Image (tube, rainbow, N blue to C red):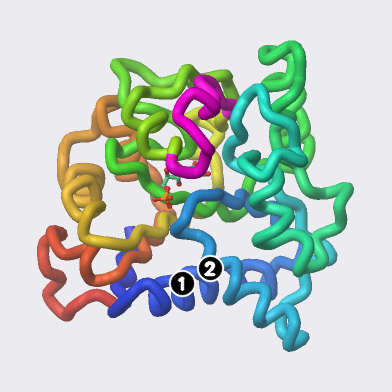
Amino acid sequence: MRVYCAKDYDGLCRKAANILSAQVILKPNSVLGPATGSTPLGIYRQLIDWHRKGDLDFSCATTFNLDEYRGIAPENPQSYHYYMVHNFFRHVNVPASRIHIPNGTAEDGAAECARYESLLAECGGIDMQLLGIGRNGHIGFNEPSSQFESSTFVVDLSESTIKANARFFSSESEMPRQAYTMGMRSIMQAKRIVLAVSGGDKANIVREAFCGPITAAVPASVLQLHNNVDLVGDEDALALLPPEKDGYS
Ligand code: F6R
């Protein structure tokens, strides 16, 4: 694992965006795995800025989003579809036909998961997966549990995730109770993973995930088994990691 420590949120966004843009520049037809949440917003802003300046071209890229709420439509402002369109896709040039996000309104959850996995396999898997981390160690919507689901599946959201994400809905009762998420195998099969994390309230879980035992109780800890992970954080989020001999990059 490579650890990149930035002074603050803006710095971590620049570092993560640099890694993503290098991927797209070196391999224009990359398959990217975007994430949502508050952490990637600044990363997307930076990528959009470079795209507008003519330095970054997504016209050959393909994307597979990590997750989506189940039971809400793409045009619902709380859907991850809406988030991605408004915070990234409408500002860059990924062709619409190559943008993939689980369909939150699909009737048959199992069929939607199978459709998503087979599309992903057809495209050759993910070259670079962007991840955030939940305060309980979740990645995507892979919640702490006693065992992992492997490929894309419908998950019952944990109480802590419902509480954490309810702030985006007008009331907690409107917050969906289920979501689609790529499973741990889908995530671990990505050729390279960039986990972005910001803020002191994530410092404990970052230490548990990367220095603690590998356990399904802390889903992100499984990333210790991946051989190509970039952990990009600000000083507060990385504060509890053991110090590097020569300091972090
Ligand atoms: C988002 C996702 C989640 C978030 C995590 C951290 O697609 O899958 O796992 O990455 O909840 O969210 P923020 O960045 O809002 O702290």
Q: Earlier in the sequence, mark 1 or mark 2?
A: 1
Q: Is residue 110 magenta?
A: no
**Range covered by the magenta-colored residues:** 167-180
Residue 116 shows up from this direction: yes
Secondary structure under the numbered disc 1 in the rendered image:
helix
Quadrant of the image containing the C terminus: bottom left
Left/right of residue 71 with respect to residue 156 in the rendered view: right
Nearest the eye: 109 or 61? 109
Q: Which residue is mark 1?
A: 13
Residue drawn at (28%, 62%), measured in percent from left and top?
A: 199
* Picture layout, residue 67 above or below residue 179: below
Task: Tell me whether the residue at label 1 lies in contact with that at label 2, contact meaning CB atoms closer than 8 angstroms.
Answer: yes
Q: Position of residue 210 (x, y in %)?
A: 23, 48
Residue drawn at (86%, 52%), measured in percent from left and top?
A: 96
Q: Mark 2 vs ligand 1: CB under 8 Å? A: no
* Picture layout, residue 134 above or below residue 49: above
Residue 22 shows up from this direction: no
Q: Position of residue 81 (x, y in %)?
A: 70, 43
Q: Which residue is mark 2?
A: 43
Nearest the eye: 135 or 110? 135
Residue drawn at (74%, 14%), measured in percent from left and top?
A: 111
